[in-house]
Image: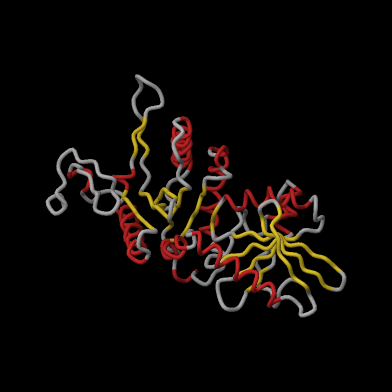
């Protein structure tokens, strides 16, 4: 490859496109240990390259060698090495990639988030732009679990990551995204991060609301506190629904959603919530059946006031707050 792309010793390269850097052979050869992790990294890169080809100019990917960063927080001290497993550019936003085998636990996993905290603090101190988030890519579940709406092992891993994120990256929890996705869903999940697709999904949701509501109901939507709120009027009763897009495993929409819910609740005392998605069911950062064990009464009410809407197909599919399928829309 060095000959093909005329890469000279000392060339750094960005890693995007064909702008490769020079690395010693020991850095580039396949590892003798952690081969499954290396295979997952390779699979992620292949998926990302397909996205690049399918969406010209909207995606760009570079591997762990090129996305690694050395930085110095103070003079006369050794530099710090920050090395994610890759970096994906989606539109104008950068997302760091972690190939997650679910083998890192305890202190090792904690150290990973401490490393992210230090790196984001460094970028902030230097007034440099921050990545939009980090994407943990899981290996695919066993095929016998493919039809399960919520995969217990995936939810448990997400909960662990979410808890550590809030513990060590609390200063960034409203803006820095934590996204978890299985490898098989990677392409579709990344495509949903493109701004235009968000608008398409929202328009589909409002259309579903009008189709699913009783014929005599009057439906309108407005923005309140930056969030869309649907008003459904029927039989002289007014019901308000906060609409929030939450795709699969993620953090910021849940954290911001709860904050906005508390603010809107002052205006609409009987406010309900609709969490909608396109491909991957909205997964709350709590275990199934544990809602009643939540100590915070406001947070408990937030989850219990929620219905889920799969708006990805021609026909809507509704779920209650316990993720059970409903025969009809909940209004």
| Image position of 260 with respect to 120: above or below | below
Identify the residue shown where x is 69% and y is 67%.
Answer: 320
Of the 4 image quadrants, the one containing the C terminus is: bottom right
Q: Quadrant of residue 21?
A: top left
**Which of 259 and 321 lies nearest the eye of the viewer?**
259
| Image position of 17 with respect to 146: above or below | above
**Which of 187 and 200 lies nearest the eye of the viewer?**
200
**Which of 79 and 92 lies nearest the eye of the viewer?**
92
Coordinates of residue 35 in the picture (x, y in percent): 29, 53
| Image position of 106 with respect to 198: above or below | above
Coordinates of residue 282 in the picture (x, y in percent): 59, 61
Coordinates of residue 279 in the picture (x, y in percent): 52, 67
Going by the picture, which residue comes out furthest to the bottom? 215
Coordinates of residue 80 in the picture (x, y in percent): 36, 31
| 73 to the left or right of 39 | right
Q: Quadrant of residue 82?
A: top left
């Amino acid at each position: 490859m060095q000959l093909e792309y005329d890469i000279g010793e000392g060339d750094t390269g960005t890693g995007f496109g064909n702008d490769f850097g020079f690395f010693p052979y020991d850095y580039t050869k396949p590892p003798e240990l952690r081969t499954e992790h290396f295979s997952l990294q390779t699979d992620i890169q292949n998926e990302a390259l397909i996205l690049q080809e399918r969406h010209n100019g909207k995606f760009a990917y570079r591997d762990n060698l090129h996305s690694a960063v050395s930085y110095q927080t103070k003079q006369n001290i050794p530099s710090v090495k920050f090395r994610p497993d890759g970096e994906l550019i989606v539109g104008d936003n950068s997302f760091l990639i972690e190939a997650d085998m679910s083998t890192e636990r305890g202190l090792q996993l904690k150290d990973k988030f401490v490393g992210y905290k230090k790196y984001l603090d460094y970028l902030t101190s230097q007034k440099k732009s921050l990545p939009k988030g980090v994407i943990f890519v899981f290996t695919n579940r066993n095929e016998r679990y493919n039809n399960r709406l919520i995969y217990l092992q995936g939810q448990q891993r997400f909960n662990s990551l979410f808890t550590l994120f809030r513990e060590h990256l609390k200063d960034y929890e409203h803006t820095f995204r934590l996204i978890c996705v299985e490898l098989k869903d990677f392409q579709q999940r990344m495509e949903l991060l493109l701004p235009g697709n968000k608008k398409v999904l929202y328009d589909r949701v409002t259309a579903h609301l009008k189709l699913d509501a009783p014929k005599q109901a009057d439906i309108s939507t407005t923005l309140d506190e930056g969030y869309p709120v649907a008003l459904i009027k029927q039989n002289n009763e007014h019901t308000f629904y906060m609409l929030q897009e939450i795709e699969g495993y993620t953090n910021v929409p849940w954290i911001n959603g709860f904050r906005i819910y508390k603010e809107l609740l002052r205006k609409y005392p009987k406010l309900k919530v609709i969490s909608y998605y396109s491909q991957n069911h909205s997964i709350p950062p709590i275990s199934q059946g544990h809602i009643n064990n939540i100590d915070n009464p406001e947070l408990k009410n937030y989850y219990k006031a929620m219905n889920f809407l799969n708006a990805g197909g021609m026909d809507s599919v509704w779920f209650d707050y316990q993720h059970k399928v409903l025969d009809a829309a909940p209004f």
